[in-house]
C-alpha cells in the first residue's frame, strides 16, 4: 500500500512539473521572446521583408530568381546565384546539390552555366566568378559576390539604355562589407540591387 501511495505521489509530481514547464517554457518564454523581437528588431523578426511600390516583393534573407516562365535569365536584371533548393529558392526545401567536385552532373551544370553567361554577358568564360556557376549550401543565398555583380554591368546597361558608369556606381553603392569587418566576404544583395536598378531611368 505504501509503495502504491509513493508511486501515485511521484506520478502527480511529474504531471505538475510537466504542466508548469510547458506553461513557462512552451508558452511564457515564447511570448516574451516574440515580444522582445518585435520591440527591439521588428524588421528582422518579421522576415526582413523588402518592399517596392508599396508591395512586399521578397525577403532580404532569401534569394529569388529573375527569369522568365521557361527559366531563361531576364537580361535586364542582375542574376542571382544558382539554387538547388527545390525548383529554385524554395524555402521549404533548403539544400545544396551535395554533388562532389568530380560529379558528372555538377561538371555538366557548371559548363552549361559558364557557356550561357559568357554568351549573354559577352565575357571570357574563364573570367566568370565561381558563385555564378555553383549553388550555395542552402540554395537560398540572397547575395552574390561584387565580382559577379560587376561582371553583369555591361549587359544590363546596354539592354536598359543606361550608362555603364551609372550602373557600375549603383553596384558599388550596394556592396556590403565583411560582417564585423572581418567575417566572410563582401557581398551584394541581388533583390535590393534590382529594386534600385528599377528606379533608374533609361
Image (cartoon, rainbow, N blue to C red):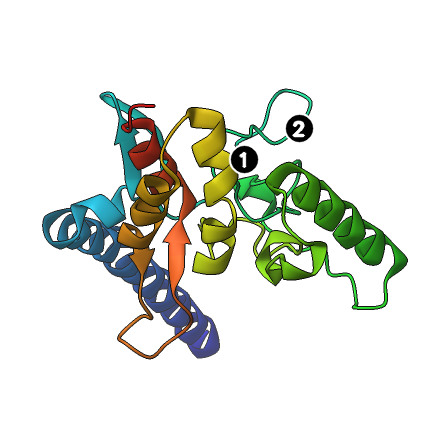
Q: Quadrant of residue 170?
A: top left
Crowd class of label 2 (few under 14; some 14 to 19; many from 20; radius 10 Å): few
| On screen, residue 202 above or below 105 | above
Q: Residue at x 46, y 71 (%)?
A: 4
Question: Dividing the picture into quarters, in which one does residue 104 lie?
Answer: bottom right
How far apart marks 2 and 1 lie (CA) works out to 9 Å
Q: Which of the 4 quarters of the picture holds residue 88?
A: top right
- The residue carrying pointer 1 sits among few (fewer than 14), some (14 to 19) or many (20 or more) residues within 10 Å by Cα, namely many
Give the residue displayed 45% in from the left and 72% down from the top: 7
Above or below for 16 versus 7: above
On the image, the x and y values in percent for residue 188 come to: 39, 53
In this image, 1 relative to 69: left or right?
left
Pick whichever, 186 or 123, lies toward us.
123
Q: Is residue 47 visible to us here?
A: no
Quadrant in the picture for the C terminus: top left
Q: Which residue is mark 2?
A: 71
Q: Does residue 129 lie above or below 113 as drawn? A: below
Residue 62 in percent (x, y) is at 44, 45
Q: Kindly give the residue lying farthest to the right in the view shown.
A: 104
Residue 74 location, x and y as percent?
A: 56, 28
> Nearest the camera: 145 or 6?
145
Work out whether residue 165 or residue 199 is closer to the camera in this orientation and state it.
165
200 sits to left or right of 35: right
Q: Looking at the image, which residue is at 34% across and 44% down? A: 165
Q: Are marks 2 and 1 in contact (CB under 8 Å)?
A: yes
Q: Secondary structure at mark 1?
A: loop
Q: Residue at x 41, y 66 (%)?
A: 11
The residue under label 1 is: 65
Q: Residue furthest left?
A: 39
Sequence-first disc among 2 and 1: 1
Q: Secondary structure at mark 2?
A: loop
Amino acid at each position: 500500500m505504501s509503495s502504491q501511495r509513493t508511486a501515485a505521489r511521484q506520478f502527480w509530481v511529474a504531471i505538475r512539473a510537466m504542466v508548469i514547464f510547458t506553461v513557462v517554457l512552451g508558452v511564457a518564454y515564447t511570448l516574451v521572446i516574440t515580444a522582445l523581437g518585435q520591440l527591439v528588431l521588428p524588421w528582422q523578426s518579421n522576415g526582413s521583408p523588402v518592399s517596392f511600390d508599396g508591395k512586399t516583393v521578397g525577403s532580404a534573407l532569401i534569394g529569388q530568381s529573375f527569369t522568365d516562365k521557361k527559366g531563361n535569365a531576364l537580361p535586364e536584371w542582375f542574376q542571382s546565384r544558382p539554387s538547388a533548393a527545390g525548383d529554385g529558392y524554395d524555402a521549404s526545401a533548403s539544400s545544396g546539390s551535395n554533388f562532389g567536385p568530380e560529379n558528372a552532373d555538377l561538371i555538366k551544370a557548371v559548363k552549361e552555366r559558364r557557356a550561357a553567361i559568357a554568351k549573354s554577358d559577352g565575357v571570357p568564360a574563364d573570367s566568370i566568378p565561381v558563385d555564378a556557376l555553383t549553388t550555395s549550401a542552402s540554395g537560398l543565398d540572397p547575395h552574390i559576390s561584387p565580382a559577379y555583380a560587376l561582371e553583369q554591368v555591361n549587359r544590363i546597361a546596354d539592354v536598359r539604355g543606361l550608362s555603364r558608369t551609372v550602373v557600375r556606381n549603383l553596384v558599388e553603392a550596394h556592396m556590403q562589407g565583411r560582417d564585423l569587418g572581418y567575417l566572410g566576404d563582401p557581398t551584394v544583395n541581388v533583390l535590393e540591387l534590382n529594386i534600385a536598378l528599377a528606379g533608374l531611368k533609361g
